[in-house]
Amino acid sequence: MGSAHSVPAEMRELADRTGFTSEQIEHLHRRFKQLSQDQLTIRKENFDSIPDLEFNPIRGKIVHAFFDKRNLRQESDGLAEEINFEDFLTIMSYFRPIEMNMDEEQLDRFRKEKLKFLFHMYDSDHDGKITLQEYRNVVEELLSGNPHLEKESARSIADGAMMEAASICVGQMVGASAGASSCSQGLCWHHNGAGGVPASQGTPLCHSSFGWRCFLQGPDQVYEGITFEDFLKMWQGIDIETKMHVRFLNVDTIAHCY
């Protein structure tokens, strides 16, 4: 963390930037040194030594999130090959516990930062929206540990959840089954083929790898996926502030997201 003379100033800067106390930063620095094996940076393979991640169904997405430049608040996009302690601290700050003295503005910003981190875990192609296929991937991974649930059942759950999410964002929605399309009050779901086509020419909705398009009041208005603004609407009333946190019990600091 720097030389002995620079640590206090560096610590204050890190505390101001992340919201962690000096004690918490020292705690996380010990954890970082464990993971990096006393190196200056961490690579993806270093996370293999975390027992709590071994059987987590979305282990890959969690590790991926640590190297996502969007979460590192960097101007460039893509994935970092390795991260240093300041990067590690930035990621861990998304799991920072809520503080009782936060005002409404701080709480709102705190909540949006956590939700933005979650949104990035779903938005795997970095295009600013969560498509049906991306939603399916996460749900199927989450349910992969259930031996009694077939892949098609997991896909159906993801499809239903995506329909409900879109209905929250754009209003009443009527589903469509394979081989047929359905419209209500100008709202239609059609299969989004390569390049996309007007609703009048669209292929009926089916289970495919392309995803769904929702046509609103006409072919020129489309709902192609969940934007971050939509994501915020979906999470209204859900207490993400206490469900996504880091626990400072011992040197084996654990980040939680329920």
Image: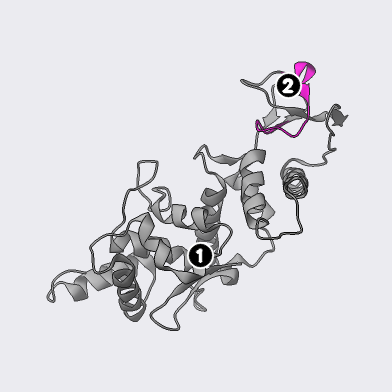
Q: Which residue is mark 2?
A: 219
Mark 1 is on which residue type?
Glu
Return the x and y of residue 143 as percentages of the image width and height. Answer: 68, 56
Residue 214 as seen in the image, left or right of residue 123:
right
Q: Residue at x 38, y 53 (%)?
A: 72
Q: Which colour assignment does the render follow?
A: one colour
Q: Which residue is mark 1?
A: 54
Residue 16 occupies quadrant: bottom left
Secondary element under disc 1, as helix, strand or loop, is helix
Residue 21 occupies quadrant: bottom left
Return the x and y of residue 132 as percentages of the image width and height. Answer: 67, 40
Residue 135 as seen in the image, left or right of residue 247:
right
User: Disc 1 vs disc 2: which is toward the camera?
Assistant: 1
Residue 50 as seen in the image, left or right of residue 160:
left
Q: State the extent of the magenta-drawn residues as a range.
A: 198-213
Q: Is residue 162 visible?
A: yes
Q: Gap in Å between the C-alphas at discs 1 and 2?
A: 46 Å
Q: Residue at x 64, y 45 (%)?
A: 135
Q: Nearer the viewer, residue 211 or 115?
A: 211
- 78 part of magenta stretch: no
